[in-house]
Amino acid sequence: MALPVLLSFSTNPSLFPRNLNPNPVIPNRRGSPSRNRSPVIASSLDPPREPTKLVTFLGKGGSGKTTAAVVAAQYYAKEGLHTCLVIQSQDPTAEQLMGCKIGTSPTLCNNNLSAVRLETSKMLLEPLDRMKKADARLNLTQGVLEGVVGEELGVLPGMDSIFSALTLQKLVNFLPSERSLGRTEFDMIVYDGIGSEETLRLIGAAERVRWYLKYIRNMAEKTDIGRLTAPSFLKLAYESIRLNGGTSEGKSSTDIWNNIERTLEKVSCSLSDSSKFRCYLVMDPSRSASVRSALRYWGCAIQAGTKITGALGFAPQSSLGVEVADKFSPLSFALVPYLSTDSFVDWDATINSLGKKTKDLLGATTESLQSSVRFDPSQKTLTLFMPGFDKSEIKLYQYRGGSELLVEAGDQRRIIQLPQGMHGKVGGAKFIDRNVLVTLR
């Protein structure tokens, strides 16, 4: 059946705020903890190490997202990987499962496993402090900004995603040029976000910001008010965020624009690289609503610009997983036993009880990742894999003279660059077994 097509054409400063934890416990890399240990200094003779990996989970509320994050963190730590569980919620479930207090600075809970709770009201203090120092040099606000007290500021909608993205970047270090030799690094970061929708926004943020940056830069360079005010505001913003750890000293506006563009591109590419980022679906196989939500989030994750590594189901019976696994093919599907937050969890026994399939999936030793876009230049067609969506929810638009295809679904938009030989108008589209087959002419 043909899919309705809508066409529109147009011609390394500190990771956390100061003084939050004056005597932190710093774990040895792949080893036991020590107190007030000096940062590990990398040597040129050390063998090259794998980049830090970021792991997160998507699922309906109550499906076991936080439990899955804790299980994964405990598994990685038991495997000898220096792991940090990052919680961005005031829900005490993670603390109950971990059996330790989780604060706003990384705290060692057991060998190889640290935990931290992100609080936006504290994360905004450091960028504000850098902004004040930059303003003192640029004299942009004539001293007004110096009178702003960070501890008095509350959190506005949207701030959580912005500051969590900056903090995760410092923890994971997606930008190779930003690697610091003077601090301890983690092997695994397990992130339990505020909610699945918020996590999806976070995943797609870098690519979406690139879209906005293109238009903002155009206004800044081609309008009188932009040419007058943009350089100062650009330097102030650049030094406040410092994605690459540098300063604006000696850099022109063009250099800063280009640097930001390259930085966003690197982060965006990292979040679509399964060797650096793993995203899992979580569900209760006995609840149809939970299964449908997981399928939906699968499609939404593709729209956000990433891949799903696999699916996990919390169920007491293996028979429940057999039927559900077929719905998520070709993803690998594995079961995780129920855990109670009302009693002590024996983590050694729990991790040992995990099946081989579950361990392989958490370790990403299985390979079932499917490309979400397939081009066929000979037929001038492209196939979009879009699970979880109904044909009526998918809209296609074209801009830039037919060189791009914009796909809208699940409150997400993504732009697909068409190969040179496939530029042209959409001639038709069909929805076939979770795939949209688009024909160009």
Image (cartoon, rainbow, N blue to C red):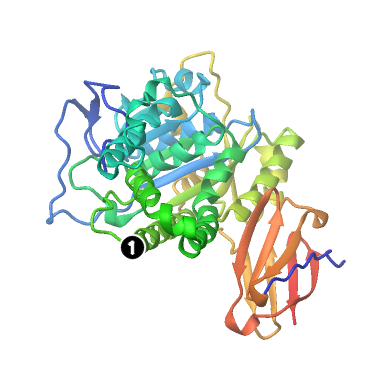
In the rendered image, the residue lying farthest to the top is: 342
Name the residue located 86 percent from the left edge and 67 percent from the top edge: 2
Quarter of the image for the N terminus: give it.
Answer: bottom right
Spot occupied by residue 320 in the image (x, y as percentages of width and height)? 70, 37
Q: Residues within 10 Å of mark 1 (few under 14, many from 20)?
A: few
Viewer can see residue 405: yes
Name the residue located 75 percent from the left edge and 35 percent from the top edge: 289
What residue is shown with label 1? Answer: 255
Spot occupied by residue 150 in the image (x, y as percentages of width and height)? 38, 25
Residue 146 sits in quarter: top left
The amino acid marked with disc number 1 is Asp
Say which of 328 and 265 sits in front: 265
Spot occupied by residue 405 in the image (x, y as percentages of width and height)? 66, 68
Say which of 223 and 209 sits in front: 223
27 relative to 246, above or below: above
Viewer can see residue 103: no
Name the residue located 58 percent from the left edge and 82 percent from the top edge: 420
